[in-house]
Amino acid sequence: MSLNAAVEAIRAEARETDQRRLLVVHGDRDRCVDAAYTVLDSADVDAEDATLLTTREGFRYERLRPKHADRLLGTTREAVVVDAFAEFSPNALGQSVGAVDGGGLYVLLAPPLDEWPDRRDGFDESLAVPPFDLDDVTGRFRTRLVETIRGHPGVAVYDADAAVLERDGLTGGGAPPSEPEPRVPAGTRFPERAYGACLTRDQSRAVRELERLAEPDSAVVIEADRGRGKSSAAGLAAGSLAGEGRDVLVTAPEFGGAAALFDRARALLSEEGNLASGEERRLRTTTGGTVRFHPAADAAAEAADADVAIVDEAAALPVRLLERFLDAPSAAFVTTVHGYEGAGRGFSVRFRDRLRRSGHDGSEIRLEDPIRYARGDPVESWAFRALLLDARPAVDEAVADASPGSARYDVLEREALRSDERLLRETFGLLVLAHYRTEPNDLARLLDAPNVSVRALTHEGNVVSVALLAREGGLERETRESMYEGVRVRGNMVPDVLTSQLRDRRAAAPVGIRVMRIATHHAVRSEGLGSLLLGEIREEFGDDVDYLSTGFGATPELLRFWRRNGYRPVHLATTRNEASGEHSAVMLRPESEAGRALHDRNAARFRDRLVAVLQDALRAVDPDVVRTVLRACAADAAPLPDLSEYEWRVAVGASFGPGLYDASPGPFRRLALAHLLEDRVPLEPRAERLLVRKVLQAHSWEQVAEELEFVSTRQCMRALGEAYRALVTEYGGEVARTERERFD
């Protein structure tokens, strides 16, 4: 069969079934590009309804570079052609595959499939982090990708060099079952136009459920696979609520993720005649309502002031940040279950319990019916399989009896992961749970990056805890010097932070193992398996590296976990991560003299700069994060309470006599820091929060009294004096004792 005839056949079947079809053209690049023209012509694709992802120029169709594939998110095309010869990445695949409409074609141009896994390209260069080079990168991801291409239904394969159709991609599927038209439910609160805009009954049900947001203390969770119209449903609800005069606060990991929501809200308000102004990120209504977008961290801080909060792609945000949106009178959490945008299972496991305990009247709905193509679409199922978008851990029943005594420590060789689909899915599924943003590129990194390794605990063959490890440091002098001068060196996060940001010129010489991610199956959490896995990793690597490390968005719970396992902080980032809303902590566990020296000098520098930075860039950090990170720090606190005679008189006077803290805060800051580092004096948590907020972060008495729920600023002042009586008694020497006798 000729290429023209093959394309006509698969295009006809795609239209008949309202599904998509995948055509892979492999061979010489020029021949593949020529074949792509033939495909688009034979498929009778409108030139304005096709996009080519390629680094080449000169096409009459819309062209994007593969690295800009994210611009296709939320859009639809009759055909998308992806040139995999340059700038191709798993992310580009995941970002672009959903853009093809029902009846359309997704075309992948690739090197000869037998040779593709052994070729190296720009994406491979990104995996070749120092001290490794391109020859160290493997091709397991592409080997697996080729296997899915050759074995999955609905995938046609054409050899452009031999001009041979190897697979016709036909499934024999007939016309899809007709779906009942959506209807307007009786007794609705939202405008009829909101329901008239729904394309499926599922979507109509979602809009009806979102009517609950008009009532206080309501929370709605909407989950769906990609392309089910969940964001559009949220947009119809947002427009309806704003039309009633409500202030609707919208957020997402990036504005692009909420663009469809704003499009639907804008269209509905225009049709209803309620749109007063329609900026890209803010809609105003004639009734005084708004639909406004803010980045996640900023939106979380403003949630209590809005009438309604809507979080789109919620699974791509960390649970601690999501919880803050429950401060809004009502809130909706809209998320992708399987797909490029998020980790739906992690959202389910980690957030739902918090939502149930929040006191909100919660409800959940899941959308099953695709909007742009019919159910059973083979391109969707191929993408899920090829990119493990639907990866999940072992079922709860398989691991429910796992314990530290039954668990086995395993080195998960990457070739074994590639060849064992169940093992790979369980491993990657757990790693998805460990992080709020997991991308298809992470799958390739797991399988092919030379600096990455995987360790796990298994129970009866099932993965119950997994860690993704990265080798860092041990860099040559020239590379270390370039890092010190500000050149970013990929794959060396901890050495880079310590060298370029914190100016430790020697930090990239010692060799470390960084725990990039660690996750334990939700069915057996709090059983000690995560700590057991870290202990086994230390046993395996401790004699061969200088230190173990980790970096993560700092929360009190995570800081305590890593402290229990011997890791100590050396840095707390001065800016919040845009996605997590947290300040990242870097923690080390020394394993050699070189590692100990690295830790000790950076822990001491961390101690010394904290007083200044807590009054500046870290002034808004949660006091419990500050308390916990200082409690975990192993820096020597002895220099801090070495006050002058005058400073001790000031401290005693303000604690036991008529002196004032505000007259000379310096000695009080050093004493507070010493206490939080050493924990030598038993103080209540609220007293320690008072030390952080008032003394270390220098907030006003009024603000601190209100935040810590003192009945008055006077009571807040007395509480601070009581705390310092204990600290002065503990740390004060002869001068302090003599001065105290004046007030006994």
Image (tube, rainbow, N blue to C red):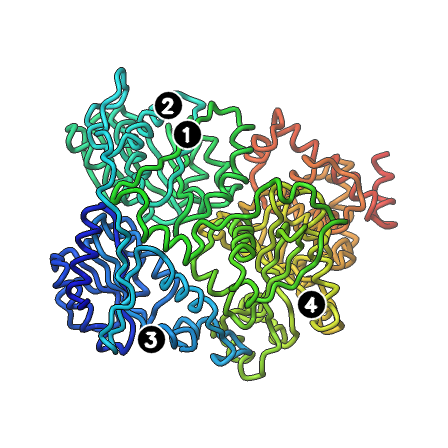
| Label 4 – label 3 distance at C-alpha | 43 Å
Position in image of residue 196 (x %, y %): 20, 28
| Label 3 – label 1 distance at C-alpha | 48 Å
Q: Nearer the viewer, residue 233 or 393?
A: 393
In the image, which is nearer the foreground, mark 2 or mark 4? 2
Picture quarter with the C terminus: top right
| Label 2 – label 4 distance at C-alpha | 52 Å
Q: Nearer the viewer, residue 590 or 714?
A: 590
Dot 4 or dot 3: first in sequence order is: 3
What residue is pinned by disc 3? Answer: 112
| Label 1 – label 2 distance at C-alpha | 8 Å
What residue is pinned by disc 4? Answer: 547
Amino acid type, callout 4: Tyr
Q: For the residue carrying disc 2, how many other residues have a C-alpha within 10 Å: few (<14), some (14-19), or many (20+)?
A: many
What residue is pinned by disc 2? Answer: 212
| CB within 8 Å, label 1 to label 2 | yes
What residue is pinned by disc 1? Answer: 220
